[in-house]
Image: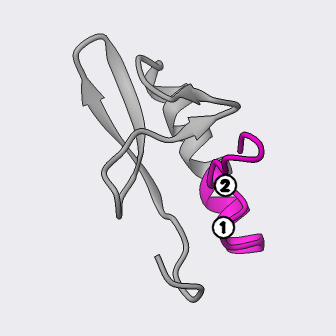
């Protein structure tokens, strides 16, 4: 991902709940080292909205880094 791009999050139904995922990598979102899978629909929407808001405010801020969780 180059410096001008930012993550965009969406949700998808999966067995056992909903997953929040990065639309570029198709990987589940990580929040404090926890994959955002198996969520209720409303919780998944809220998490995706929060992560997308972080990205609009400060691109790259929602991404997990080796030196600390997102």
- The x, y position of residue 37, in whole percent, is 43, 24
Residue at the image position 66 percent from the left and 55 percent from the top = 62
Q: Is residue 59 left or right of 10 when viewed as pictured?
A: right
Residue at the image position 72 percent from the left and 61 percent from the top = 61
Taking depth in this image into account, of 17 and 61 the one nearest to the observer is 61
Q: How is the image coloured?
A: one colour
- The x, y position of residue 11, in whole percent, is 38, 42
Q: Extreme top residue here?
A: 16
Query: Helix or strand or loop: what does disc 1 sit on?
Result: loop
Q: Which residues are magenta?
A: 51-70
Vertical placement of 56 versus 70: above or below? below
- The x, y position of residue 51, in whole percent, is 63, 52
Vertical placement of 44 versus 22: above or below? above
Could you tell me if the residues under marks 2 and 1 are in contact, i.e. CB atoms within 8 Å? yes
- The x, y position of residue 4, in whole percent, is 57, 89
Q: Is residue 41 left or right of 47 when viewed as pictured?
A: left
Label number found at residue 62: 2
Label 1 neighbourhood size at 10 Å, few (<14), some (14-19), many (20+)? some
Vertical placement of 26 versus 46: above or below? below
Query: Helix or strand or loop: what does disc 2 sit on?
Result: loop
């Amino acid at each position: 991902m180059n410096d001008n791009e930012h993550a965009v999050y969406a949700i998808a139904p999966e067995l056992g709940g909903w997953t929040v995922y990065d639309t570029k990598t198709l990987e589940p979102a990580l929040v404090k080292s926890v994959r955002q899978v198996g969520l209720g629909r409303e919780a998944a929407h809220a998490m995706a909205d929060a992560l997308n808001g972080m990205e609009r405010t400060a691109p790259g801020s929602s991404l997990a880094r080796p030196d600390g969780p997102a």
